[in-house]
Image (spheres, rainbow, N blue to C red):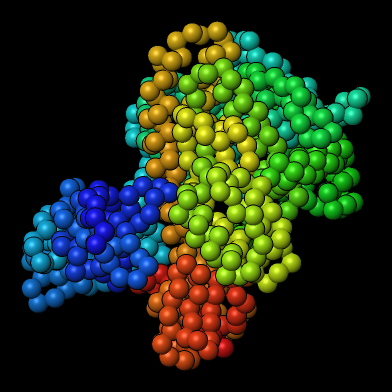
Amino acid sequence: MAKREILEGVLSGNERGYAFLIIGEGKEDYFIPHHDLKDAMHGDTVLAETTDGSGERTTARVLKVIKRGISELVGTYFTCKSGGFVAPDERKYYNDIFIPFGKGLRAKSGDKVVCKILSYPKRKSPEGIITKILGRQFDKETELKSILFNYKLNEKFPKSVLEEAKQIPSILTETDLKDRKDFRKELTITIDGEDARDFDDAISIKKLKNGKYLLGVHIADVSHYVKKGSEIDKEAFNRATSVYFPEKVIPMLPEKLCNEVCSLKEGVDRLTLSCVMTIDLRGNVIDYEITPSVIRSSARMTYNNVQKIIDGDKKLIKEYKKIYKNIILMNELSDLLIESREKQGSIDLDVKESAIYVDKKGEITVLPAPRDKAHRIIEEFMILANVTVAEYMYYLEKPFIYRVHESPSPERLENFYAFLSGLGVRYNKKKDQVFSKDFQTILKNAENTPAYTLINRVMLRSMQKAKYSPIDVGHFGLSKEHYCHFTSPIRRYPDLVIHRIIKEFLSGKQNLEEKYGQFVFDASSQSSEKEKNANEAERAVDDYYKLLFISGYVGEEFDGIVSGVTNFGVFVELNSGVEGLVKIETIKGKRFTCDQKNYTLSNGKTTYKLGQKVKIKVVGVNYGERRAEFVFI
């Protein structure tokens, strides 16, 4: 009998009543059946011990709850004879909350409410009190409010922050321009989405006489206005990132900053921090300068118009004749950089993402997210600037925040190799360290096979998540030894911090270790956590909009691919990116078994696997579970 191990971790629940014990990123999770949870719940930090379990899953049981993870949640209120109860929106929180008489704030059945948990009686549901009524269930505004509250996202800034922002002057003075390189006579352009309101990066480009390129990436100098320890800075640290939804943005900074004084608007003088790079014909940066600067954007361009110009739109070429050559140069250089990164082993996963559009009438459209040349141009230039700045600061050995992406854990890597073997895909199994080039080779070998989409998805799931860290361990996915986030200080706190550090170093300040040594650890941890929370909130809102969209297509048939398999059904993703569940009871045949390692659901005769093409009919939308419902045709 295997020796039992005592573990501490956080529970991740499941709506079916069981949970997983999460020990840490890259480490194996432990399955805990419902009867071994005691009174522990989703989000709780617990002490557990491993058990023998059954089958291939590593199992454990809860010994005691160390710390409760959730004290307040959002859900739908329902009345009952003894009072009422709240069914949580968070499906991982598998317990309803009992609300005694007099604690319901006069809520009615079907109200969406905020509930505070007061006690955890043994062998009973938690007890709580309703603190706020958000509105009626299924009302769009109410549902969106619920998601924002669930992820602790606040649209309003504290008064002290807004008052401080008011004091920031809108017009530049000679003092502001002191010790800055002047790029105002350079042709610089911004390229963003149609509805973008904050512009934090601008591009300048030249072809030198020797054939090399001179690329300038000019980033809004937010650090000039937001000083360390100010009220605005404290709030930016707390938020750590802007959060983007289809019809609104919850910004990291007040509007006065993000949409006005820091935004690189066309024809207006703006303070920037510039990374100007000389690039050879192999895509290598052979020289660079990082400097505080001032620019005056020559044109506010959109991805759509840039793409049309690249495609040869004569009308737009004539309209933007002053910058036409620059756009062609940008396209030429980005092709060179893409080729260079590919040779280095950078992994370019082909995983579909969705773009959600809402018109003035409120009509929702969901389409595959564009990834055309215009988007790739900006993506490549930003990556290059991020790498250049990270390398510069790494060799100076100053406190810094890096964007790191660790290689896959041995367990996940072994599972991925086993999966590839089952498909008959060729791969070079490494005994020691795996490199991104190895993953790139796997994708190339599978490029023209039916399993290509499937391998992309499983490869993504086998990787660890990128995060912020003051310790530089490289970026596995990009195949870069050094990488950071330098290019978006309006919407990301780590970018703002490293701008401060860079500028202070360039100005000759010596106490960087004392000032930022511990702070870069705190900011990295905070920003990584807040980024994860923001991503989950954005996904929850996007999923809700997708439900509203697909509800107009009930009864219609679509092509899709299998995006997930479970013991209760098959998830199918449509070309638009909308995902729905085909419940197992609707699938013809009996005794289906789910194989999580090989991502299949099979009964011997019929098999469904990740990436498989299928045809479905939309049969309904379950707003309670926030899930579209499909059946196979």
Compared across the picture, whether 371 is left or right of 220 comes to right
Give the x, y percent position of residue 248: 49, 51
Q: Which residue is drawn at the image coordinates 54% and 65% (left, top)?
A: 419
Comparing 138 with 36, the one in front is 36
- Quadrant housing the N terminus: bottom left
What residue is at 68 percent from the left and 72 percent from the top? 450
Quarter of the image holding residue 525?
A: top left
The answer to whether residue 424 is above or below residue 617 is above
Residue 44 visible in the snapshot: no
Horizontal and vertical percent position of residue 387: 63, 32
| Residue at the extreme bottom of the image, as rendered | 589
The percent coordinates of residue 430 (x first, y second) are: 59, 50
Vertical position of residue 477 compared to residue 181: above or below? below
- Say how many tags the image has: 0
Q: Is residue 518 visible in this depiction of the protein?
A: yes
> Viewed as shown, does residue 114 lie left or right of 521?
left
Residue 305 in the image: x percent, y percent? 77, 49
Residue at image position (65%, 14%) is 180
Residue appearing at x 51%, y 54% in the figure: 413
Foreground of the two, 599 or 132: 599
Q: Quadrant of residue 365?
A: bottom right
Q: Quadrant of the C terminus?
A: bottom right
The correct choice, above or below, for 513 with respect to 328 in the image is above
Residue that lies at the very extreme toward the right in this rendered image:
209
| 393 versus 284 height, above or below | above
Quadrant of the image occupied by residue 627:
bottom left
